[in-house]
Image (cartoon, rainbow, N blue to C red):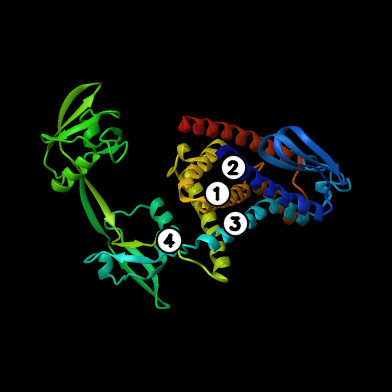
Amino acid sequence: MKILIAILIFSGIVLIHELGHFLLAKKNGIVVTEFSLGMGPRLVSTVRGGTRYSVKVLPIGGSCAMLGEDTDEDTLKGSFNAAPVWGRISVVAAGPVFNFILAFLLSVIIVGFVGYNPAEILQVTEGSAAEAAGLRAGDIVTEYQGYHIDLGKDLYLYSYLNPLEEDEVIHITYERDGEEYQTSFVPDVNVRYLLGLNRESADTMKVASLIEGMPLEEAGVKPGDVITGINGVDIPDGAAYDAYIKEHPLSDEPVEITYMRDGLEYEATLTPAEYRTPDTGFAYRGNCVKASGFEVLKYGALEVKYMIRTTVMSLKELLTGGLGMDDLSGPVGVVDAIGTTYEESKSQGTLMIWMNMLYMAVLLSANLGVMNLLPFPALDGGRLVFLILEAIRRKPVNRQIEGMVHFAGLMFLMALMLVVMYHDIVKIL
C-alpha cells in the first residue's frame, strides 16, 4: 500500500510538471508529439489532436515531447525552435512554475485543516541571557542572525544548519503588541558529561551506536554490547540507568562500567567527556495554530517559500560539504520516506495520514521545481540559460553545441542518479 501511495504521489507531481510544458506549448502553437506518464515501453496510448497520450511501463517520470525540440530545425511550422524565443522560454519555465503552483494549492489545503506554526516564544529561561536581553513569552521572532523568519520551522532550519558557537552573539528581531524590537545577547552554555552511547531504545541498555572520540568508544565498547552496571550498581534496563544518572550525575570523575558481549562480562574504567552546548535560553512554538480567512492563503504561500528555501539551503550545504551523499535521496529514497511517513501516520488517524501525504507532495513538488530551475545542462534551467542568451544576442547559440552540452549533462545526471540510488538501497537495507 505504502509503495502504491508513493508512486501515485511521485507520478502526480511529475504529471503536473509535464502538464505545464504541454499547456504552454499548445498556447504557443508548438506541436506536442507525445505526452506520457512513466518511462519505457508504452502500456496504453491514444492519439488525439495530433498528440499521442501514453502510459508507460515504469510509473516514475514522464515527458512532453515537442516537434523539433532536440534538432536544429527552426523553419518547420509547429516545431519548438520555430516558436518565438520568449514563447519557448515560457514553455520551458512552465514545468517548474506548475510545480510551485501545485505546492501552493496543497499547502493551502494543509493550512486550512491543520494551521501554521508561528515563531512564537513560549518560554524564556529564568535568569538566562535571553531574559536579561528582554525576550518574553509571546514575542514573535521575525529575524534571527539576519535570517528572515516567517514560521517556527524557519527558525529550526536555520539553527539546524548553523549550530550556535560559544561566545557567538545572537541577534534577534521580534514583535510584541504590534511593535518591532531588536536585541542581542551571548547565549548561556550548558555543561554536561557524557559516556558517548546511543541506546537501541529507552527501555534497553543495548548499545546501538557510539559517538566517535567519546569515552565508551575509546574504552573498547562496541555496538551490540549491553551495559550492565556503573560503579558497582546493577543497571538491568533503561529506566534503572536514567534513575542512576539522575541521582548520580556524571562529572569529570572516573567511573567503572561493566558490559556484556557474547555472554562474557567485561569491565572498563573511563572518564566522562565534557560536552558544552550553547543555549538560546528560550523555547518556541512547535505545534500549529488555526488560520482563518486570507491567513490560509498567506501561510500557504509561506509554506511553499519555506520549502524552496529549504531546498536551496540544502543544495548550498551539499556544495560546501556541510551535507554529504548520505543526505541525498533519489526515487528509491523518496519512496522509502513516503512509506515511512505513511506507516508512522496510521496511528494518528485518517486525517493525519492525508495531511502528511499532502505535506510530502508539497515538499517534493517544490523540490522538483527548484531542482529543474538549476542552470545545469539537460535541466529546464540549463535550457533557459541558452534561451535567455538567444534573447539577448537575438540569435540562437549553435544548436549542435547546445545539443552536445545537454547530452553531456544528461549523462552526468544519469550517473549521479545511479550513485544516489545505490546509496538509497544501502541505507534501506
Please identify the quarter of the rendering in which residue 300 is found.
Answer: bottom right
**Residue holding disc 4:** 152
Residue that label 3 marks: 106
Q: Residues within 10 Å of mark 2 (few under 14, many from 20)?
A: some
Q: Amino acid at mark 2?
A: Ile
What separation in Å lies between label 2 and label 1 (alpha carbons)? 8 Å
Which residue does the numbered mark 1 point to in the structure image?
357
Nearer to us: label 1 or label 4: 1
* Depth order, front residue of 305/298: 298
- Marks 2,1: beta carbons within 8 A: yes
Residue at numbered disc 2: 5
Report the amino acid beneath label 4: Gly
Circle 1: element type: helix
Where is the N terminus found, in terms of image quarters?
top right
Q: Is residue 59 left or right of residue 171?
A: right
Q: Distance between the Cα atoms at labels 1 and 3?
A: 10 Å
Classify mark 1: residues with Cα within 10 Å, few (<14), some (14-19) or many (20+).
many
Identify the mark nearer the N-term, 1 or 4: 4
Real-space Cα separation, disc 3 to disc 4, in angstroms: 20 Å
Mark with earlier residue (3, 4): 3
Q: Are marks 3 and 4 in contact (CB under 8 Å)?
A: no
Q: Counting residues from the N terminus, which is met first, the one under dot 3 or under dot 2? A: 2
Q: How many residues crowd around disc 4 within 10 Å: few (fewer than 14), some, or many (20 or more)?
A: many
Residue 109 seen in this snapshot: yes
